[in-house]
Amino acid sequence: MEKATTQAPKGIRQVIWASSLGTLIEWYDFYIFGSLATVIATQFFPKTNPTAALLSVLATFAAGFIVRPFGALVFGRIGDLVGRKYTFLLTLVIMGGSTFCIGLVPSYESIGFAAPIIVLVLRLLQGLALGGEYGGAATYVAEHAPPNRRGFYTSWIQTTATLGLFVSLGVILITRHVLDGDEATSIAKFNDWGWRIPFLLSIVLVGVSVYIRLKMNESPLFSKLKNEGRTSTNPLKESFAHKGNLKMVLLALFGATMGQGVVWYTGQFYAQSFLENTCKLDFDQSRTILIWAILFATPFFVVFGAWSDRVGRKWIMISGMVLAVFTYRPLFNEMQRSTVPSLEVSAHTDSPTPTLATAASTPITVGNSTYWKLVGIVFILILYVTMVYGPIAAFLVELFPTKIRYTSMSLPYHIGNGVFGGLTPFIATLLTTVYHNDVLVGLWYPIAIAGVCLVIGTLYISDRIDTDITN
Amino acid sequence: MDQLKRAFGLLWMLLGFAALIAVILMAQAEIARKPTADTWIQWGVFVGITLPIAIGLFLFGLFAFKGEYDRLPTRSSEL
């Protein structure tokens, strides 16, 4: 049985490369919309028009919170019925096509209401495709990997979410500065039409990835099941209506992905938003700090994935959550304290609760030492992400049987990340508007969710590594 | 350990119920404060996604309370 899961090193490298490249491109596609939200809003969703603004709200909330889990169900089901290879090929084409088309849509000024409606539909398609991609890629790699290297091999898939952000930030920053010799003119051109370039670029990346993926074979475990006629006839029913499997889906969600999702979003997205909006760091610096931190931290996805093959997945993930719960506030406090020297002055004067918003209303640029200190802090935050996220693909794969694996692991993953993680910026901002005196109050949301998750994970999750995932 | 797992099951059930009530109350307050269509959509989405998650947490607690997580399955035939 185990022979079916073992590939020659060259074969498994191709499997990892094909799967990871496609997943990285999907993340890139999904992130550029979020990163360029402000520019897109001015082009397609003018605030002066209430209907267009309403469509903008839909695009923001529906894509992440509803369509992603729905995509997990739709494509998870197809993946368990038809196969992993064609399903995650389909999600890649949908994602790449949608992204490319967003780059082509004429502005609201040119075609009126059709523009925001088209963009909304394309954004929903992006969310749907993303919901189907990850489960397929993780399952595909895991079902090719030898049992003692499953954490290591699937960790390459885990690097893609962070590298996708890295590539999207890099492409946006480069495009923003190369459109003209004069920086201000270049930025103006970027805001006018240059923002379309990162979207249009996607078609080239997707084309290459589709070509590579087309040459790959179906997962050996799924092929075996299919040849024996033992695939599921109703993966949704078997995943969520059978109590035995539902119990494991709930355990995966509340004992692992829920905490992992908030740690991920806090480390990568909330940290950048905090630097830009609370610490008032300028656009370029807040992004390059994240880029450096990602660059230094990304190898640790593989380190923790590989380590999980030896010591188990559970305690590495739990340790990441414990560190997050106990150090988020000191780390963010240090970020805030470091950025504006004038804040330290105001803290000693008559203001009992100085805030950066009052200390610096315009974007600031920090010096070299503070810059690298901030890189170090964000690096630590992303290191926590690598601890909780690096081993989780192997953990999820081992929790469910082959015939319903794609469906069963996709839903908790996308609820954990899309809903619990995706809500982090919103709830953090909401808390900040209620409790004005504490700029760190938004952190209580990820701390509470990660805290509950680590208690559930510690109590109920087994540290056993399932060597045989054929059953 | 099994007793602890079961006792905590009660807490998860309560937490699921409390999460749903909290989100509904927040939605009511926010919609009353700003009764526009986008507030309705936004909080409608939040209540809509919280409902199945809260039911899920309640069920998780119920399973834990009944001792169904005392021993985890090791083969798919046990699922």
Image: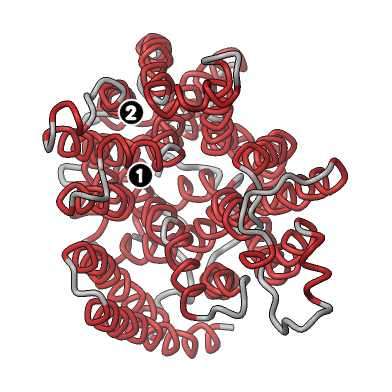
Q: Left or right: where does residue A131 sit relative to residue A329? A: left
Sequence-wise, the earlier of marks 2 and 1 is: 2
Q: Position of residue A348 (x, y in %)?
A: 84, 78
Q: Is residue A18 above or below residue A429?
A: above
Q: Nearer the viewer, residue A71 or A28?
A: A28
Q: Please check whether the numbered discs 2 and 1 fall on a single chain.
A: yes
Q: Crowdedness of circle 2 by 10 Å Cα count: few (<14), some, many (20+)?
A: many
The residue identified by callout 2 is A88
Give me the disc on residue A405.
1
Q: Nearer the viewer, residue A426 or A337?
A: A337
- Spatial CA span between label 2 and label 1: 14 Å
SS assignment at label 2: helix
Q: Left or right: where does residue A114 sit relative to residue A176? A: left
- Chain letter for mark 1: A
Q: Is residue B62 above or below residue A338?
A: below
Q: Quadrant of residue B60?
A: bottom left
SS assignment at label 1: helix
Q: Quadrant of the C terminus of chain A?
A: top left
Which amino acid, mark 1? Answer: Arg
Q: Crowdedness of circle 1 by 10 Å Cα count: few (<14), some, many (20+)?
A: many
- Identity of the residue drawn at 39% across and 37% down: A39
Q: Nearer the viewer, residue A210 or A162?
A: A162
- Identity of the residue drawn at 54% across and 66% down: A461
Q: Position of residue A220 (x, y in %)?
A: 40, 25
Q: Position of residue A204 (x, y in %)?
A: 40, 11
Which amino acid, mark 2? Answer: Phe
Q: Is residue B9 above or below residue A470?
A: below
Q: Left or right: where does residue A148 sit relative to residue A113? A: right
Q: Left or right: where does residue A441 sit relative to residue A75? A: right
Which is more foreground, mark 2 or mark 1? 2
